Amino acid sequence: MPMNMTHLRAFHLVANYGSFVAAARAAGVSQPTLSEQVRLLEQHHSARLLQRLGRSVELTPLGRSLFSVTARIFAAEKEAEAILARAQKAMRGELRFGTDAPINAVGVLSAFRRSHPGVAVQLVSGNSAGIRQRVLSGTVDVGIIADETPHPELTARTLSTQDLVAFVRNDNPLAASKTISLRDLVTQPLIIREVGSVTRRSIEQALSQAGLQPEEVLETDSREAVQAAVMAGLGIGVIGEDEFSDHPRLVLLDFTDRIPPITEYLIYRTDNRGSHVIQAVLECLA
């Protein structure tokens, strides 16, 4: 015959609180009801679990052994309730998601929306420095950035790695070779994201180490603006390879020089790791 969990819970409460009166008050039932449930448990299993001492109780050796088991059972029950509560809350919540390139967030957000279709998602874009600051200030829950700088208040998880590439309009003299050197890069205006962009920082470091200086820098505030400027024939664009959008008038150029790849990280405030939306995002990654 299956064990009666109501009777087992009654025993656990009494053992935990040390008296029938306190246990009944915590459970919201009458003391006689709780006493009867424990009596039925002992009777059914022909076991003495509690020794009544006036208004308090003392566990028998068998009772102590059982209490160590019920403690694990009902702790696991509470953990299961917390997991389900987070899921229920996430279904009605909001996820504020920041990224330095929307294309990098597509995979994570697609998985998240499949698992939590009722969650309202607010997507915020900007450069790595800006998204990092938004996560720190709490105006964004989770961010994807290419900035590996450690911060004591942030937790970072590696997502992906991508190479830097250049691209030009198809009538540019460099388009035919399908590759480009850093020395070629500085012969035309360089079209790149604003200060704070990891793409900009990476290419500027590579040029500095090679002792090169761009002829001219055209600064834009988004990946789309970089592409539009290149499309207009204003110069050479530099971007993360995964961010490049195929277009018949654009030609992708691989660098012949060795340039360190860009790594994308998912970041969140460490003190918010218990948040239901952050846990939901991390579960999608897993």
Image (spheres, rainbow, N blue to C red):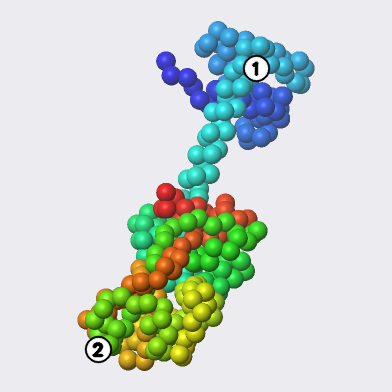
Q: Is residue 216 visible?
A: yes
How many numbered tags mark residues here? 2
Residue in the foreground of this view, choosing between 229 and 51: 229
Circle 1 — which element?
helix
Which of the two discs, 2 and 1, labels the residue nearer the N terminus?
1
Q: Residue furthest left?
A: 248
- Relative to 256, is 14 above or below? above
Which residue lies under the disc numbered 2? 171
Residue at the image point whose x is 45% and y is 66% from the top: 260
Picture quadrant of residue 269: bottom right
Is disc 2 placed on a helix, strand or loop? loop
* Quarter occupied by the N terminus: top left
- Rounded to the nearest angstrom, the CA distance separating label 2 from label 1 is 83 Å
Q: Amino acid at mark 2?
A: Asp
Instruction: Give residue 114's position: percent from left, percent from top.
Output: 34, 57
Q: Amino acid at mark 1?
A: Arg
Q: Position of residue 19 (x, y in %)?
A: 71, 24
Q: Where is residue 268 drawn, in percent x and y?
A: 55, 60
Residues packed near mark 1 inside 10 Å, few (<14), some (14 to 19) or many (20 plus): some
Q: Nearer the viewer, residue 131 or 201?
A: 201
Disc number placed over residue 156 in the picture, else none: none
Confirm whether residue 139 shows in the render: no
Give the x, y percent position of residue 238: 40, 78
Q: Quadrant of residue 150?
A: bottom right
In the rendered image, which residue does mark 1 sit on? 64
Foreground residue, 113 or 172?
172
Q: In the image, is 23 to the left or to the right of 143?
A: right
Quarter-of-image position of residue 79: top right
